[in-house]
Image (cartoon, helix red, strand yellow):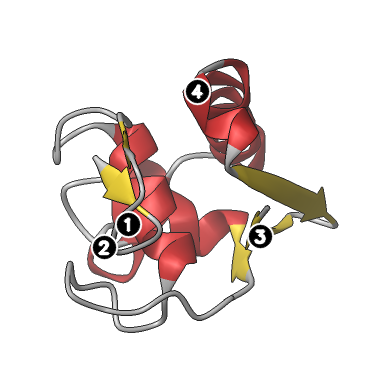
Amino acid sequence: YLQLRDSGEKIEIGSAESGEFRLVQCLFSPQNFPSAKYEPVVQTYERIFAVIQTQSLLERSAAERGSHREITHTVEKLLHNLQKGNMRHHVTFISKNNRVLMEIL
């Protein structure tokens, strides 16, 4: 869940292991921990892909990292999933040049 305001409703994102949850957490703040306050941060598709995987891209060999096409497809699919749910009433995702920013509405 994501709760944007102290008394606001909880917005269901998915389990803590889901790609959607990890994507939102990555875009929420540079600290990437649950108690962090919202601080807009632009992340690259590669950084998001690294966060949603179990291992960092830096720790994986080039063959395991995933192609640019795979990274783009994965991140855009997650963004689409988040935009079609209840999240679209609370946040928007700005995606340009393989970089993403989440803004609270």
**Three-letter amino acid code at the position of disc 3:** Glu
The residue singled out by tag 1 in the image is: 51
Above or below, 81 against 24 in this view is above
Left or right relative to 85: residue 29 = left
Rendering coords of residue 96 (x, y %): 85, 54
The residue singled out by tag 4 in the image is: 86
Left or right relative to 95: residue 52 = left
Residue for point 40% across, 62% down: 26
**Three-letter amino acid code at the position of disc 2:** Ser
Secondary structure type for disc 2: loop
The residue singled out by tag 2 in the image is: 56
Secondary structure type for disc 4: helix
Check the image and name the residue furthest to the front.
7
| Nearest to N terminus: mark 3 or mark 1 | 1
Separation (CA) of disc 4 from disc 1: 23 Å
| Nearest to N terminus: mark 4 or mark 2 | 2
Separation (CA) of disc 3 from disc 4: 15 Å
Q: Residues within 10 Å of mark 3 (few under 14, many from 20)?
A: some
Separation (CA) of disc 4 from disc 2: 29 Å
